[in-house]
Image: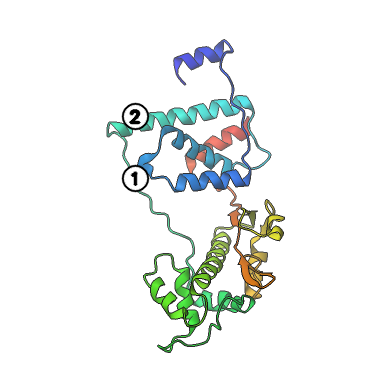
Amino acid sequence: MGIFSRIKKLIGLEQQEVFRRWPASELEEKKVYLENKLSEEFTPEDHYLSAEWIIQRYLPEGDDPTPEQWSEIIADIRQKIDINLKNAAVGELVKIEYVQLEPYVITKEDFLKDVVPTFSRFDLLPDPYLKDSQGRELWTVLFEFTQQYSYKYGEAKDTLIFFCDAFQAEKLVHDLGRTYTALRCAQIEGSAKLEVVCSSKQCSDCMSLDGNKMAVEELLSAFKNEAPLFPHPLHLEDEVSWCPAPYLSPEIPLRMGDDTEFYEVLMKILER
C-alpha cells in the first residue's frame, strides 16, 4: 500500500471496495475472455481480473469478506502484481513455464464402451458398426472427432459423407466426447458435483437447470446407461437435431498445498 493510500485510510478518505459474488455465467464469461487473450497482450487490469477470478472460483460460498477485508486483500494483491510487472519490464522477473496435464484424455476403449452405445439415441449418427470401404467400423472413424489435435478430421468427414451428414456428426460426436471427458476429469479430480451453466444454445428444459448442481456420478451413470443428460436429442416437427451440452463447472474443494500463497490469503480472509 502506497503512502498516499495509507494517509487516506488513516483519515477515512479511502473508499472501500465491496466484494460482489459473480454468478456462474459471469465467471464463465470472464474465463473465456482471459483464455482467449494472449498473455503478451495482458494489461495490469487483466492481471487483476485473473487474480480475482481465482478468488471468485475457489472462495467457499458464505465466506464472503467484509468491505474492509476485501479492500485490504485486493489492494495487497494488486500491489504485488504491479511490483512483478515492473520487475518483468526490466528483466528481473524469472518466468517459469508450467505445463498443466489434463487428468484424463478419452481413449478408444472408453469411447467404445461408454460413448458409442449412446449413438442409438441420435438419428443423426450412423450405425457405428457399419464398415467403410477400407473395412473400418464407423465408430473408429467417429472417434477422431473427439481428438482435439487429430490430423484425420478431413479424412473422417470424407468417409462419413456416404453414411450421414458429416458436419452434424462431427459436431455431435465432439460434444459427446467433450462432455464425457469433462465428467471423467471431474471424477478423477475428486469433484462431487458440477454446476450447470447454460447459454442461449440450450433448450428450455436445459435452461431450467441453469445454476443447478448435479452429481458427477449421476451424470456418468447416465452415460453408461446409454442415456446421457447432456447432450440429448431434440425432435422439432420434421427436424431432427440435438441440444448441445451446457458448460459443466466442477466444484473442486480447495486443497492445502495446491497453491500455498493463495491458500494463505484465503485463510487470512476466513479467519477475520
The image's mark for residue 96 is: 1
Q: Residue at x 61, y 77 (%)?
A: 123
Quadrant, the C terminus: top right
| Residue 219 lies in quadrant | bottom right
Mark with earlier residue (1, 2) = 2
Query: Please, which residue is most extreme toward the left here?
Result: 91
Q: Is residue 234 left or right of residue 185?
A: right
Total numbered circles: 2
Read off the residue under disc 2: 86
Q: How is the image coloured?
A: rainbow
Give the CA separation, mark 1 to mark 2.
17 Å
| Residue 91 lies in quadrant | top left
Residue 258, visible in the rendered structure: no
Crowd tier of the residue under label 1, counting other residues whose Cα lies within 10 Å: few below 14, some 14–19, many 20 or above: few
Q: Position of residue 19 (x, y in %)?
A: 61, 32
Give the amino acid at mark 2.
Lys
Residue 177 against residue 93 in the figure, above or below? below
Q: Residue at x 48, y 31 (%)?
A: 77
Q: Position of residue 222 (x, y in %)?
A: 66, 70
Give the amino acid at mark 1.
Ile
Q: Residue at x 45, y 48 (%)?
A: 35
